Amino acid sequence: MMREYTLEEIAKANGQGGAPALVAFQGNVYDVSKSDLWVGGGHQEMHNAGRDLTSEMADAPHDEEVLKRYPVVGVLKK
């Protein structure tokens, strides 16, 4: 069974101060910590780690397929 994360837990995983960089998308939680594109928890000055990016993906210049590059570490708790 996958670990369940609350939005509050994800918010603490914002990639700053040594925290991991986690993002949620469509109920899954991804660890983007090792990506050079998410250094310091920010991505292309458009998105921040520690958030549910489901509603923000439409603004991205790419589709959701890019998230498949990163490990799913859990699911978003409803």
Image: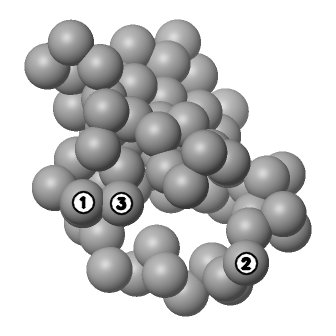
**Residue 1 versus residue 50 in the image, above or below:** below
Q: Dot 3: what SS? A: helix
Badge 1 marks a residue whose secondary structure is helix
Q: Earlier in the sequence, mark 3 or mark 2?
A: 3
Give residue 61's mark.
2
Number of residues whose C-alpha sits closer than 10 Å to that of mark 1, classed few (under 14), some (14–19) or many (20 or more): few
- Residue 77 lies, with reference to residue 33, above or below; the image says above
Q: Amino acid at mark 1?
A: Asp
Which residue is label 3 attached to? Answer: 37
Q: Which residue is mark 1?
A: 36
Under tag 2, what secondary structure? loop
Can residue 38 be seen?
Answer: yes
Q: CA distance from mark 3 to mark 2?
A: 14 Å
In this rendering, position of residue 43 left or right of residue 53: left
Residue at 55% of width from left, 37% of height from top? Answer: 48
Q: Which residue lies at the image location 73% right of the left edge and 78% below the top edge? A: 61
